[in-house]
Image: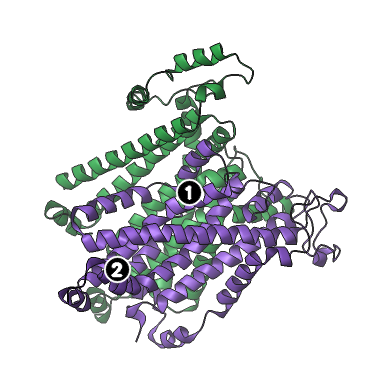
Chain colours: A purple, B green
Amino acid sequence: MAFPLPVEEEVALTGDPALAAAEHSAGPRRRRVRRRHLPWFSGTILLVFVITGVFAPLLAPYDPETLDLGASMQPPWFAGGSSDHILGTDDLGRDVLSRLIYGARVSLLVAIAVVVLAGIVGVTIAVLAGYKGGRLDAFLMRTTDASLAFPVILLAIVIVGVFGASTLNVIIILAVAGWPAYARVLRSEVLRLKSQDFITQARAMGGGLRWVILRHILPNIVPTLLVLASLQVGLAIIAEGSLSFLGLGVPPPAPSWGGMLSDGRENIADAWWLPTMPGIALSLVVLSANMMGDWLRVNNDPTTKR
Amino acid sequence: MLRYTLVRLAQSILVLWVVVTVVFLLSRASGDIAELMAPPDAPPETVQLIKENLGLDQPLIVQYGRYLGDLLHGDLGTSFAYRAPVNDLIREALPKTFELGLAAFAFAVLIGIPIGVLSATRPGGWFDRLGKGVALAGQSVPNFWLGILLVLLFSVRLGWLPAFGYGTWQHIVLPAIALGWYPLASLARLTRSAVIEVLNKDHTVFQRAKGVSVGNSLTHTMRNASLPIVTLAGIQLGYLFGGAVVIETLFAWPGVGQLAIQGINSRDYPIVQGVVVVNTFLFVLLLLLVDLSYGVLDPRVRRHARGVPAAG
């Protein structure tokens, strides 16, 4: 599990143009056609994910934590189970579909909170370091590198070892692990902008620091920020899943996809659907987030625009 | 080169010191360790005795000094739960984590890099599209779920390989594949980009124009494309050791990750602390070696390092 942005993403984002172009070169003829495609598949999945998370109490057929030992270990409806529990029940008789729906809520909450928190910290540091430069820049970037060098899972072990497992701690851990990617990538974006004529002009006109940053720098880093954010959604959801799987994340009995996977593993020999269903949900959402990020990047990258 | 090496070395030591200090402060912030160690109904005198024994009655700065001193001597303290030196526990678990990490790394490198190179030789071809699919799936399917699916198929259904445990060579196959899948995907993607970039450079195009086949020019290409690939491979190796925690837990692999999770569950903080310190040390060391290997692979870095430090 590598939560700080994977290196190859960073290479593509920090605009080594040759590498980024190579990443997407699919032959000169195919390129233009591909760009017009809207990401229907990933867009639909993500929309369903968000709606499910927001309206979980309205959509779920059962309460996700209610035990029904009389109806435990029922297979999904399409594998010989009853239509009362479409995706079957777990060893305690809880409805798998309802737990999946509420699990989406946890994943959504964590993903949004992490992306927003890490984004705010990362953008602030990127703008300060990139725009101010000098010693501040050197200090902030060395701090960023040091944070990048620290594996998330170790951070999680330390924080959970000390403060215990909770959803809030998951968010804190992932936000602490997530900001350096924003800082690194966006700083180079700010550096690139800073040397451009319109910024020089804005400053020559007497624009103050705050005005230049708010009106000219920030709006121009938004496209890159969006790409980063969508990639981080995928990473955050996987990381939340891993932490909950280890028992370091969302504490039971609250439903979370990672926790369901962990419970399901215990019954793997008797009930294949228990570890399979949450994995499908998790992979679909992460796949969609990654595809969306890829699409945004291709359409955002000046080297692939014609 | 010497100057560069020294600067990087100093930076690495600084990072290590910061991590060690943060771990120390966090572990002291977690509450009274002596109360945790003592039996639940122990009288206050016992708790006090434990405190004095561990030096917990001393001021924080003294404790910190002692902790740093112990670390410098390579002493990680004593586990509460096992009543054994943390050093011994880690020394026993670490080779097993290495074993798994190296197996996964070999799987990723031996399959990922060829996929990347083959994809790059004909971008947009069927193999390239297949490789892209594999890479996307590798980055989206969480490794622990992949592990569960592998167990479901190869252990529960087919009964070919053991579902968990440590011992024979059969035990390592499933965890190594599950763990190696993600690095495989990112290595394949990066190799593809790096090779395409070099293939588009003038000197390669010139060679091709003179009639050198793709296969022959690849030998020249690979050395030029190797820098980003080596960086990523090094970082991935670091994550394999640090990130094996989940896979070790899933497959009951008796490595360092398992040790840390058990440490958390039994509130055995010297173990947690020891694992984090050792892992960070290895990770920082690895990054240092990766950076220094640039100089060996690319003479331009050597020259650069002697002059002005790299910008940004």
Q: Residues within 10 Å of mark 1 (few under 14, many from 20)?
A: many
Q: According to the image, label 2 marks what residue?
A: A189
Q: Is residue B117 visible?
A: no
| Label whose residue precedes the other's in the sequence (2 or 1) | 1
The residue at 34%/75% (across/down) is A21
| Amino acid beneath label 2 | Glu
Secondary structure at badge 2 equals: helix
Residue at the far right: name it.
A70
Report the residue at 55% width, 57% height from top.
A110
In this picture, residue B78 sits left or right of residue A127: right
Residue A135 vertical position relative to residue A16 in the rendered view, above or below: above
Q: Is residue B235 visible?
A: yes
Same chain for mark 2 and mark 1? The answer is: yes
Q: Chain of mark 2?
A: A
Q: Is residue B39 left or right of residue A180?
A: right
Indicate the position of residue A198 as horizontal and vertical percent values.
22, 78
Q: Which mark is residue B149?
A: none
Q: Is residue A47 above or below residue B14?
A: below
